[in-house]
């Protein structure tokens, strides 16, 4: 969502800049009674003067705007997953969440027979709760847990809660 | 722009979309008082009023276009700008004897960045100072190599901040450190 917001803001900024300059130039040309190359096409004028408020097209566009607004509003107001994981409150130390998850997934991937690992880390109070999804032999669960613990130790992570491991036999999607 | 600023911007845009769409729907179903759902979007009365007020209407349109372009320019600049220290100029200290010591904030920031990158395993460091100069908030981001033990870097960062506080003579009011670790096989 953060990337989508940035890209959408860039597009909005470019559209505002280009549209604003066009509108200002064309309106000034009209004021000065000079020819306006972009306003010579009268299609938009004919459409706006002949289409009524009752037109189904107008209703569809208005309904679409309400729907889009509600979707954007819901996306902005829902709780976002924090980008960082707090390690220690005293020295203000944080680790980038995606880096931690990637490192843990790499660590799980070193366990023989385990592939396509995905790890999500949630924080409950001061505890980290890793959730591992991977394909491999379910009997390798203990080794996966050990690999995650080792990597968390290397990262100097705080107290870890229960590690949720889900190993699916080959052929299942993670 | 920060994530919070983006959220605020798009929340406002979403509210405007909902309000505009709802108003158009209300006009379309004849719910708006004084509205005529049978009228055209650009009604004859509106066009007549526009022509009567010319050239003020076209000048107003030009001014609105200029304002839109200006806001687009500001937004574009805010999007493309890198976060910079909010503390500028100099950090100043009155001494016990007459006189003051002034140190350029940029120089201190670069010094702390150099100190941080001196630690083994720290590939890049970025420091931003915000807040009031005597007790600034210090925001640090460090990029670590894959094989770096995080605990050792934490100790080094703590020591570097203590050195910074001693040199600058100002204790950070708030310290925030974010570490990013390169991917790599453990």
Image: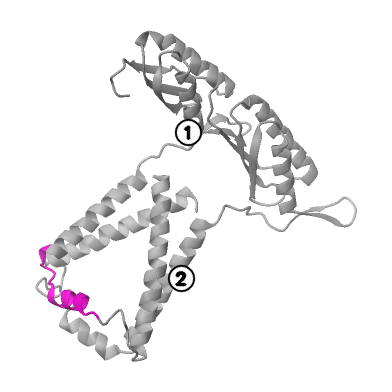
In the rendered image of this protein, does residue B41 appear above or below residue A5? below
User: Which part of the image, by quadrant, shows the C terminus of chain B?
Assistant: top right
**Lateral position of residue A96 relative to residue A171, left or right:** right
Q: Is residue A52 magenta?
A: yes
Task: Find the residue positioned furthest to the right.
Answer: B97
In the picture of the structure, the residue carrying the numbered disc 1 is A98
Query: Horizontal and vertical percent for residue A63?
Result: 18, 57
- Please report the residue visible at 28 percent of the width from the left and 54 percent of the height from the top: A69
Q: How is the image coloured?
A: one colour
Query: Horizontal and vertical percent for residue B45?
Result: 17, 83
Query: Can residue B20 be spotted in the picture?
Result: yes
Circle number at residue B70 = 2
User: From which residue to which does the magenta span run?
Assistant: A41-56
Which is closer to the viewer, label 1 or label 2?
1
Query: Can residue B138 be spotted in the picture?
Result: no
Subunit of mark 2?
B
What element does badge 1 sit on? helix
Query: Horizontal and vertical percent for residue A83?
Result: 48, 38
**Lateral position of residue A56 relative to residue B143, left or right:** left
Determine the image quadrant of residue A14.
bottom left
In the rendered image of this protein, does residue A48 appear above or below residue B149? below
- Please report the residue visible at 80 percent of the width from the left and 43 percent of the height from the top: B167
What element does badge 2 sit on? helix
Q: CA distance from mark 1 to mark 2?
A: 37 Å
Q: Work out whether residue A137 or residue A73 is closer to the camera in this orientation and state it.
A: A137
Determine the image quadrant of residue B150.
top right
> Mark 1 and 2 residues: CB-CB less than 8 Å, in contact?
no
């Amino acid at each position: 969502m953060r990337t989508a917001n940035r890209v959408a803001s860039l597009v909005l900024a470019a559209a505002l800049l280009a549209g604003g300059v066009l509108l200002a130039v064309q309106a000034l040309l009209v004021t000065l009674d000079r020819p306006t190359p972009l306003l010579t096409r009268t299609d938009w004028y004919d459409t706006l003067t002949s289409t009524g408020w009752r037109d189904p097209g107008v209703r569809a566009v208005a309904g679409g705007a309400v729907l889009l607004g509600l979707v954007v509003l819901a996306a902005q107001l829902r709780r976002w997953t924090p980008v960082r994981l707090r390690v220690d409150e005293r020295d203000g130390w944080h680790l980038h969440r995606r880096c931690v998850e990637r490192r843990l997934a790499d660590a799980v991937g070193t366990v023989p027979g385990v592939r396509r690992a995905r790890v999500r880390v949630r924080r409950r109070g001061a505890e980290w709760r890793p959730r591992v999804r991977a394909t491999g032999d379910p009997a390798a669960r203990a080794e996966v847990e050990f690999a995650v613990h080792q990597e968390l130790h290397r990262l100097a992570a705080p107290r870890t809660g229960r590690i949720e491991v889900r190993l699916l036999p080959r052929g299942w999607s993670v | 722009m920060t994530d919070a600023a983006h959220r605020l911007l798009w929340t406002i845009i979403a509210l405007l979309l909902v309000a505009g769409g709802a108003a158009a729907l209300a006009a379309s179903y004849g719910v708006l008082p004084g509205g005529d759902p049978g009228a055209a979007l650009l009604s004859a009365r509106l066009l007549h009023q526009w022509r009567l007020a010319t050239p003020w209407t076209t000048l107003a349109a030009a001014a609105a276009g200029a304002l839109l372009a200006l806001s687009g320019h500001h937004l574009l600049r805010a999007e493309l700008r890198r976060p910079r220290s909010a503390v500028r100029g100099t950090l100043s200290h009155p001494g016990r004897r007459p006189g003051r010591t002034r140190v350029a904030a940029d120089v201190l920031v670069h010094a702390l960045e150099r100190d941080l990158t001196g630690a083994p395993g720290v590939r890049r460091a970025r420091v931003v100072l915000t807040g009031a100069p005597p007790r600034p908030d210090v925001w640090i981001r460090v990029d670590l190599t894959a094989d770096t033990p995080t605990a050792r870097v934490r100790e080094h960062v703590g020591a570097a901040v203590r050195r910074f506080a001693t040199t600058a003579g100002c204790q950070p009011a708030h310290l925030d450190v974010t570490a990013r670790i390169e991917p790599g096989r453990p």
